[in-house]
Image (cartoon, rainbow, N blue to C red):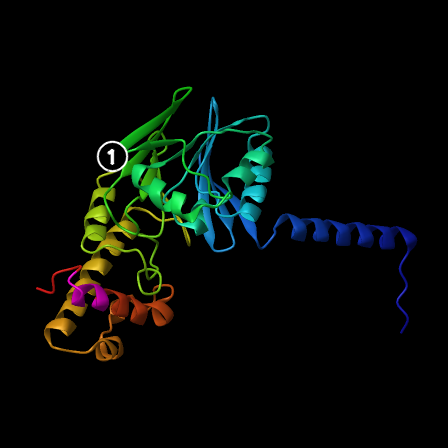
Amino acid sequence: MAIQMSARRFFVFLLACAALGAVARAQSPDFETTRVADGVYKFRWQSHNTMFVVTPRGVVAFDPISNQAATALATEIKRVAPGEPLAAIVYSHSDADHATGAPALMAGMGQQRVPIVAHEAAVAPIRLANSPDLPVPTFTFATRFALDLGGRRIELHYLGRSHSDNMLVGYVPDVAVAFAVDFVANDRIPYQDLPGWYFPDVVHAVTRLLDVPFSTVVFGHGPDGDRGAVQRQLVYYDDLRASVRRAVAAGLSEEQAVAQVRLPAYARWGQYEQWFPLNVRGLYRMLKTATVPAR
């Protein structure tokens, strides 16, 4: 049976197809911007997250992530806060997969020489990397620093060694939102064999994070969380360390520990099957090399 369509209905059909195409383009799988609180936004680029804060004196952006991500981030900042300048860029830590892209972000915002803030220990590894896409910070601090921009305060806290020796946490007090990267996440197993992690320092850092009075935390990977998510992360680190210590004390080899140590309470966490055995391997090596005392 032939299907006939009037010219008017066909025109409406074409408009609908065009609209669907525009929505698909707007919701790019590569990036997404989400409002977290008043003037606070999470920008997701593929599997990485960053955060930016709109203040009366411009926008403070955390990790640019990469050149491509930073270009998209600049577009999103201009869309969300049209006409607002980029007031500062903050590196959560020195790792290139989070800190790369500051020049691209500045260029996307039509600016130069925007201040870059980081922990003082981030300078050496960034200098060693010697990448034009990852410039050395222009301002550093030791334990705590605050950006006060037109009445809006953004606090930067160094909680000690965790994942890297230069990890900072951002905190916006007026909306109780924190930004924490890599060493904590929302029910997600830490990355692979814990490269750059320090034990037991990371446990102390998570404990100190709970001293910050946040209600919501934007993580560097995965969904946002609350205080409960951070508390669960702390318990996970304690359980992992206790289990691997027992394996070392029992004389298990590295391969035996990887094969035998299991924490089924976390089996539903993201990346459990892929990364939990690697977590065991990484911590086993730390314990055996006396980075962490085995008893």
Task: Name the image quarter holding the N terminus.
Answer: bottom right
Q: Nearer the viewer, residue 95 or 204?
A: 95
Q: Nearer the viewer, residue 119 or 30?
A: 119
- Identified by mark 1, the residue type is Thr
* Residue 216 seen in this snapshot: no
Task: Name the image quarter holding the C terminus.
Answer: bottom left
Q: Residues within 10 Å of mark 1 (few under 14, many from 20)?
A: few
Residue 289 among magenta residues: yes
Span shown in magenta: 284-290
Q: Nearer the viewer, residue 116 or 271?
A: 116
SS at mark 1 in the image: loop
Residue ID at (40%, 43%):
127
Question: In the rendering, at what x and y percent does residue 274 appear?
Answer: 37, 70
Residue ID at (54%, 26%):
85
Question: In the rendering, at what x and y percent does residue 29 appear?
Answer: 58, 55
Residue ID at (21%, 43%):
208
- Tell me: 86 left or right of 95: right
Residue position marked by numbered label 1 in the rendering: 143
Residue placed furthest toward the top: 150
